[in-house]
Amino acid sequence: MLHPKSSLHRLYLPRRMGGRGLLSVEAMCIKESRRLGQYLHARRAPLVQCAQRQNIQLKTVELTPHSESTLPQAPISIDDRQREWREKQLHGRFAACLTGPDVDMLASTDWLRTAHLFPETEGFVCAIQDQVVSTRAYQRHVMGLDIEDRCRLCHQQMESIQHVVGGCSSLAQTEYKRRHDDVARVVHQALAKYHGLIQEEERYYRCRPTGVMRDEKVRLLWDMPVVTDRTVEANRPDILLINHQMKQAQVIDVAVPLDENLNKTVAEKRRKYQGLAVELANMYDLTDVQIIPVVVSVNGLVTHDWKKLTDALPLTTKHLRTMQKAALLGTVNIARKVLSL
């Protein structure tokens, strides 16, 4: 449930801050000792006064006139634990990303409170985020073993955990695409149900989306190229919804990038489909074409715009949590498969 090399400071941080939410027995004992000392000094009971005259000391509380110096040392605060977590050379990389200005920390840690993963799986996710999983790069540069640090699949780059879960060319069209599609299926099903194209949503991992779904009002495309009058940079979004009745369209593209590429990917998705948006508006006489990137990192990080998806799309908080969980479970499966080879 806890990787032996994972951050201990993170273990005692609240889950809303990316920790595991455990209480430190040592910190609780210190806290209770301080409260006991403050209580004894405040009461000034006859027994306490007698003990003071006899210069008697308890193991945890000095029965002398009350001052901060006579009380046990204060336990480590939450802010101190978070700072020490960030200052760690290896563990602190994820902590720095989590507390970045563009990352929504509360939404990015939502899975720790709501995903209800098996404890072993949760521990492995945290180990991946702390970058202490036993990849070849970790074994060579951290553990000091004399082994080759090149990726066992592509044999081109150093096999770090970031490379395994989001940067290996040998996994791009298989494992990475499967994880990407798991996230996209949640959005596709929500749109299909909202517009009456399906009756009920099913588990995302059981869903097999149809390429084209339509009725007299809307047309919903899944991973289909769009034939345009002029050549555009990108004409194959993950999901395209054209509402003929409202004369609107939504170009939806999903991505599961590395943590450090989160913001760049959001901006790239918006820029990439500008040409397609113009062509769609001209071809179908549309008044509004929205480009909506759905981006969650391999470690579940999201930007401050994440919750705004519920305004642009018929998504609920449950859908957002399911997409984050799908991305994390996909990352876990990829890491386990590669490291077991």
Image (cartoon, helix red, strand yellow):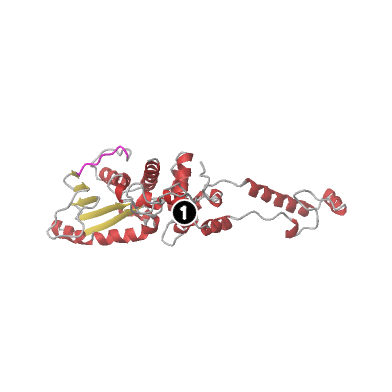
Query: Residue 88: where, in percent of width, then height?
Result: 52, 57
- Above or below, 121 against 17 in this view is above
Residue topped by disc 1: 141
Helix, strand or loop: magenta stretch: loop
- Above or below, 286 against 136 in this view is below
Closest to the observer: 237 or 259? Answer: 259
Query: Residue 328: where, in percent of width, then height?
Result: 39, 46
Q: Is residue 31 left or right of residue 218?
A: right
Q: Of helix, strand and loop, which one carries label 1?
A: helix
Disc 1 residue type (three-letter): His
**Quadrant that contains the C terminus:** top left
Q: Say which residue appears at 17% left-offset and 57% top-offset.
A: 280
Res 285 → quadrant: bottom left
Which residues lie in the magenta part? 205-211
Residue 299 visible in rendering: no
Query: Residue 222: where, in percent of width, then height?
Result: 22, 47
Residue at the extreme left: 229
Residue 193 visible in rendering: yes
Q: Say which residue appears at 53% left-offset and 59% top-offset.
A: 87
Q: Say which residue appears at 22% left-offset and 48% top-offset.
A: 223
Query: Residue 260: where, in percent of width, then height?
Result: 39, 58
- In reply to whether residue 321 is colored magenta, the answer given is no
Res 186 → quadrant: top left
10 Å crowding of disc 1: few (<14), some (14-19), many (20+) = few
